[in-house]
Image: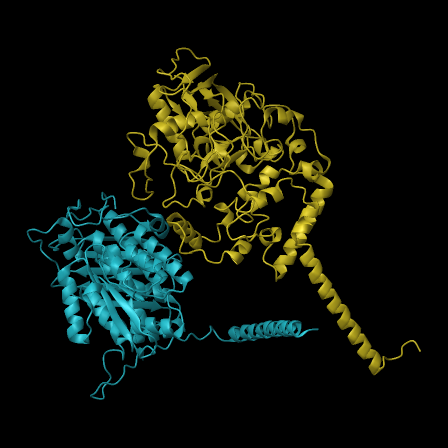
Chain colours: A yellow, B cyan
Amino acid sequence: MSKRKLSGRGKKYMILLTAILTALFLFMGDRIVRYTSSNEFCYSCHAHPHAVESWRNSVHYDNRSGMYVQCGECHLPPPGNIRYLLAKAKHGANDVYHQIFTGPENVNWEAKKTVDRAVHFTYDESCIKCHQNLFPMQLSRDGQQAHLYYSQNEDELSCLNCHLHVGHYSDLVQEGIQFGVDVETEREIYTEPATVEVFENFTETIPGTAVDFDMIAISGGTFRMGSPENESFRNDDEGPVRDVEVSSFFMGRLEVSWDEFLAFYNQTAAEGRQDNIYATNLGEVDAITGPTPPWGLPDQGWGMGSRPAITMTWHAAETYCRWLSAITGKTYRLPTEAEWEYAARGGTTGPYFFEGDPRKFSSDRFWNRLFGTDTTVINTYVIYNENSEARTQLPGSVQPNPFGLEHVLGNVYEFTADWYAPDTYSLYPDGIVVNPTGPESGTERVIRGGSFNSDASDVRVAARSHTRHTQWQMTDPQIPKSVWWYTDTREVGFRVVCEWD
Amino acid sequence: MNQKSKALSRRKFIGDAAAISALGALGVGAVISSCSRRPEYRSPVFPDQAPDGPVLRAGVVGCGGRGTGAAINFLNAGPNLEIAALGDVFQHRLDRCRNELREKMNVEVADENCFTGMDAYRHVIDAGVDIVILCEPPHFRPQSFEYAVQARKHIFAEKPVGVDPVGVRSFMAAGKMAEAAGLNVAAGTQRRHQRDYVKTYEMVRNGEIGDLVSANCYWNQSKLWHVNRQPGWTDMEAMIRDWVNWTWLSGDHIVEQHVHNIDVVNWFFGKHPAKALGFGGRHRRPTGDQYDFFSIDYVFDDNRHMHSMCRQIDGCANNVSEMIFGTKGYTNGQNRIWDYDGNLIWEYEYPLGDDGQPMNRVAISPYDQTHINLVSAIRNGEYLNESQNVAESVMTAIMGRVSAYTGREVTWEEIMESSLSIGPDKLEMGPVDIAAVPPTPGTAPA
């Protein structure tokens, strides 16, 4: 009798067996979940060479209380709900994938130390699970204001914005007070600016400083601005392609360096902060008032000197140009978007000023990622996400473009003078557009060229981007927020042009 | 299985069972709320008196009329409450308060616990008290509040709790520290402790006038008071004696006085406005640098409006009230609800007086009630902290004032991030470099 009913006793056994199996499963499951969240399990294959060492040197290990925080207590959500298991599954799958296909030696560990990456594998709710009291009595005045600000903007902010290095030690100290104070002054101090009488390359010398920089003479001409519809990764705001004529001008061979920007900072720095609402109209500063001290380290601890200056606001860059004009007696300013693209193209018409297809270079493409691709050409000319080690690089690290400009693509985004609009090109009058200056008004400025953090598709010469003023100041805990410094981007700097008439 | 692990697994089982029944309750709740429009809201029932308990000793900072009044309110709140220390900038003010307490309440404050001078607040807070009653001119409130929180005191803070964004933010942060440390904070926005208002709020919250649409609020009264400068007074002494006429000390009357009505609207709307555009001016004020009238259009983030007006001028029509409009009717916030045909559809039932007729006031004065609620919270181990509410309402009033002074629209974001800090750098008797000149809109820096 194959379809015999289970006897009462059999039923009981079945129930008991099911119960035992379920219990065993739950018990083992729990054990497994706990084991795979332990430090030992993390060490067993986490190949990041400095993870354990930097953790042992951080305040989450080395502190007066003698308590330490385990890997999973920050890098997973608090246990006890489905989010925890989902996060475990996600990170586990990710780790296995990279272990097999990428290999630890090819992982960009530097990049993972940055806030925008770190937020993907560090959980605010886990920070808050232990740090429940955001207003302890011992909290400093700055801390009070920062946490008050956080309590009003929790959705937009992460604990990491201010407390990036608490879990893994870094010698970058978030202290801006001494910023720019020690500038080497052993070199010759220039007393006169450069004299420019003919239209050729020259070296500007900043009076009262030991700082100089090269300017390239760029003869005016007509070019095709924007990208054709069949260009890979093209965005709609890059068209329609227009014939544009620009007049002759000089342009910095390099992006403005920290040496140059600090010359400005040291000569003009203001003591206090300017109040965004009540201060005089910022457009009408008579004596040039320069930046206030920044919060944190604008150079990100990467070093200053000839490295491009970054994280200043557009207002700060524009004020720099006015200051430079005033002390050199020339007319320095930010390039218009048209001047920038004309200079960056250097007479070429393709996606880059060198040979190559963005589709071949981009790591956004699955096949490229999986099988690799020959990036020799782009590596010769551009600092971008595949070769930058997540930071800006020094002059001489790549070849210049045909006009002699270095880093014009990649390294840092460069401010232009123009307001951003997605339909800028279509709004220009018919025919050849002469010296266009973009929309008359707007809320964000055009930035160009892509950065050390950009994919190959975003360092195309026609690719356009723009400032994100509010987002880039989200974590500035100063009240009011600085008009001079961004806290939440590391990718923006600028290049100057000098007028020739 | 030993005893311990048995107990543990039993607890875990109970925990799981509780979680399951909570889940069940949630499901039932969802079903119920899908039938009824919204869950019924019940206002807290205020006690007539604070419960008995170990002696609570209070110190008063700022012994003017309000400080003396608040001391008496505190003593009225229940048994075993003492005023143990007094502090004021001026001796004559302190003496008057001490006499009042002696005569009216039969309370004697010892000589060694009476402090005068600009730092009197520190001495009061450090005099071994449990509760600090802060009633000095508003400019000083953030500083003394923070000091009291750091000293782990429960606090009654009279409104307003600051005169500028920097001060109010400092108060907010200290209020959150108080919360973290379990220190109770009651505020002088006493309408939130006034039984008729609280009942009306309950009615409105339960949809009696529908969804809220807009609000008006008013504090139009005669001239308040002023003190003419006497020979021999320094600038600082003259200003503090005349403090309701100086913006750096009082915040101007929109902040100092009208904040009450603004607070009611914020309370009923459950949030603060997102921006303000207003105007104001000065016709007849004899001293100081303040305006004597304001009119502000406040706009909430969802584009609902609150109109606020306040005036301190003799011989004009007066009105101190709020009007809150909903989709189905409107209310004065205090005790009545009307529909749009003009019918009175609800009225607060006041207690009967000795003559058997309903009185025109609530059974317990809201000023006493505030202290009853504060002491009850301390003694019952409940928790009360009004610092965030009062700070937001004060900031709302400051946002309106700055708009009127400058003529510009001011957003909440701007005012919350503003570095505006008014008053002299040094708080000491002597010259003060602030002229008796009111701001001129369109030109004034702030």
Q: Is residue A375 visible?
A: yes
Query: Residue B132 appears at what percent x and percent y?
Result: 29, 64
Q: Is residue B339 visible?
A: no
Query: Where B269 falls versus A244 (above or below)?
Result: below
In this picture, residue B217 sits left or right of residue B34: left
In this picture, residue A36 sits left or right of residue B248: right
Instruction: Return the residue found at the far top.
Output: A198
Q: How many marks?
A: 0
Q: Quadrant of residue B181?
A: bottom left
Q: Quadrant of residue A353?
A: top right
Query: Residue A62 appears at what percent x and percent y?
Result: 54, 47
In this picture, residue A6 sits left or right of residue B8: right
Query: Residue A138 appears at what percent x and percent y?
Result: 40, 53
Nearest the viewer among B59 and B41 is: B59
Instruction: Return the residue found at the far front.
Output: B112
Instruction: Return the residue found at the far left.
Output: B231
Query: Residue B406 appears at what percent x and percent y?
Result: 25, 47
Q: Quadrant of residue A182?
A: top left
Nearest the viewer among B181 and A387 is: B181
